Image (cartoon, helix red, strand yellow):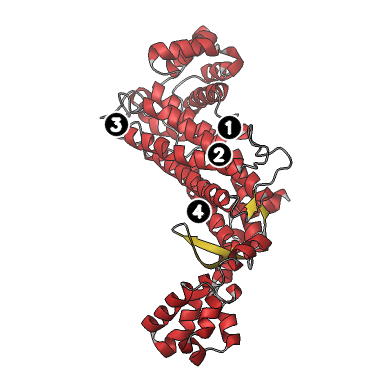
């Protein structure tokens, strides 16, 4: 209910096992390239770094006894290789090196389908902004009817929120480094070749090279967590707006998806905005997971006692939530039913009162701002707003009926909405998300 299949597939226990074994293989191969272990040993280790060789249940039991899954993994890997290669398994590394790098690999791999889904969501938001650039909509502030805007501008806000989240996530993901520091971050066991082994390890795994070991300097994961939290906020904003616009009394949009979607077990008449609801749920969970990672980041000396361990599950949960949220946002926006006629009905039902600011702006040069405001305040309180304005001598002295009707036309009080939409669409067309969508089509 909170994930998405493509992303979830990269977050399973077998996927983490594969990542850990990829690290052990790359470590042995990088060490052989730098001359710190025999090539024959590296080849033997690499041949046995296959998930099917390992017993997941035994790894789980051993992880509980050792405090992390790398200790039993190394034990099983050592037993699986020829005797001559056994002294070189895990050479120069510590458990945290392998698990940190493995989790970084998992995050990077899960990020690929996540970004594809995010690109689809961004494209769908751009399509809505473009198609509804001039579709007039009632803006609401503090939960109340405010003034006219456009649905295109609302969608453009979603678009830029998603684009900004993508930029942050891409930057955090591309900067994720491999971890290799050995027992206390000095790589003493690897001698002078240590930094080169670390760089080659990172290169083999497609990760950033570490500037130095980051056992208790957790900024790379904090950047990733913050980016994922921002993404959940951006998708949550979409879900909240759609849910409010889809309320029965508003009914300006509806979730698509065909018969049966959004049904109620008790009330056959209902059509619940299920994707919007689940986006809201994910957005509410995200800050606590981000907060856990930030709280865990204050770690003592060279290796943490509990802070490091507290990161593992919240990080995977954040990735899972973000994957589900991006997939649901893409589905929600690509199927969204937009109802311009209902938007206009809701505007007209207010009898022109939401254009009070527009009328006051036309009267202010002649009456002054304060007096113009007072005139409009009296008219707003009347049963018929337009009639009250026409009956007011101050209005009739300065505005004709035609000029008043122009002021009461929502389409004439949209300010720079269209310009803002065009700017957002321009940013989209200059983005990597747009280039990726063009490649796919």
Which callout, 3 or 4, points at the residue further toward the start of the chain?
4
Helix, strand or loop at disc 1? Answer: loop
| Camera-nearest label, 1 or 3 | 1
Circle 3 sits on which residue? 299
Q: Quadrant of residue 218?
A: top left
Circle 4 sits on which residue? 164
In space, the residues marked 3 and 4 are separated at their CA atoms by 30 Å
Which callout, 4 or 1, points at the residue further toward the start of the chain?
1
Q: Position of residue 296 (x, y in %)?
A: 33, 32
- Asked whether the beta carbons under mark 2 and mark 1 sit within 8 Å of each other, the answer is yes
The answer to whether 177 is drawn above or below residue 158 in the figure is: above
- Residue placed most toward the observer, 116 or 406: 406
Circle 1 sits on which residue? 1
Circle 2 sits on which residue? 278
Which callout, 2 or 1, points at the residue further toward the start of the chain?
1
| Camera-nearest label, 4 or 1 | 1
Which callout, 3 or 2, points at the residue further toward the start of the chain?
2
The answer to whether 431 is drawn above or below residue 423 in the figure is: above
In space, the residues marked 4 and 1 are separated at their CA atoms by 26 Å
Q: Position of residue 105 (x, y in %)?
A: 51, 32
In space, the residues marked 2 and 4 are separated at their CA atoms by 22 Å
Disc 4 crowd rating (10 Å Cα; few below 14, some 14-19, many 20+) is: some
Helix, strand or loop at disc 4? Answer: helix
């Amino acid at each position: 209910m909170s994930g998405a299949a493509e992303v979830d597939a990269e977050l399973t226990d077998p996927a983490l096992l594969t990542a850990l074994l990829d690290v052990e293989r790359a470590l042995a191969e990088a060490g052989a390239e730098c001359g710190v272990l025999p090539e024959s040993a590296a080849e033997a280790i690499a041949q046995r770094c296959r998930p099917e060789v390992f017993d997941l249940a035994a790894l789980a039991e051993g992880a509980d006894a050792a405090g992390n899954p790398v200790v039993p993994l190394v034990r099983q890997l050592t037993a699986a290789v020829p005797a001559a290669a056994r002294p070189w398994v895990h050479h120069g590394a510590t458990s945290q090196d392998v698990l940190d790098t493995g989790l970084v690999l998992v995050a990077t791999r899960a990020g690929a389908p996540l970004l594809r889904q995010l690109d689809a969501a961004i494209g769908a938001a751009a399509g809505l902004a473009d198609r509804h650039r001039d579709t007039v909509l009632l803006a609401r502030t503090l939960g109340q009817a405010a003034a006219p805007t456009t649905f295109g501008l609302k969608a453009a806000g979603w678009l830029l929120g998603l684009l900004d989240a993508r930029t942050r996530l891409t930057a955090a993901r591309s900067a994720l480094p491999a971890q290799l520091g050995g027992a206390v971050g000095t790589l003493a066991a690897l001698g002078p070749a240590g930094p080169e082994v670390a760089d080659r390890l990172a290169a083999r795994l497609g990760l950033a090279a570490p500037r130095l070991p980051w056992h208790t300097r957790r900024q790379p994961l904090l950047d990733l967590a913050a980016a994922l939290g921002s993404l959940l906020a951006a998708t949550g904003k979409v879900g909240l707006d759609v849910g409010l616009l889809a309320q029965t009394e508003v009914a300006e949009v509806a979730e698509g998806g065909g018969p049966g979607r959004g049904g109620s077990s008790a009330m056959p008449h209902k059509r619940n905005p299920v994707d919007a609801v689940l986006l809201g749920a994910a957005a509410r969970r995200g800050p606590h997971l981000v907060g856990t990672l930030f709280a865990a980041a204050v770690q003592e000396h060279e290796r943490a006692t509990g802070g490091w361990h507290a990161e593992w599950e919240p990080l995977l949960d954040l990735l899972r939530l973000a994957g589900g949220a991006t997939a649901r946002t893409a589905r929600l926006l690509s199927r969204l039913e937009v109802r311009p006629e209902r938007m206009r009905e809701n505007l007209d039902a207010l009898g022109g009162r939401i254009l009070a600011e527009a009328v006051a702006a036309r009267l202010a040069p002649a009456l002054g701002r304060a007096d113009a405001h007072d005139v409009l305040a009296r008219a707003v309180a009347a049963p018929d707003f337009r009639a009250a304005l026409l009956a007011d001598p101050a209005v009739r002295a300065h505005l004709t009926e035609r000029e008043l009707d122009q002021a009461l036309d929502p389409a004439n009080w949209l300010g720079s909405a269209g310009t803002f939409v065009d700017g957002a669409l321009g940013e989209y067309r200059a983005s990597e998300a747009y280039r990726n969508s063009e490649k796919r089509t």
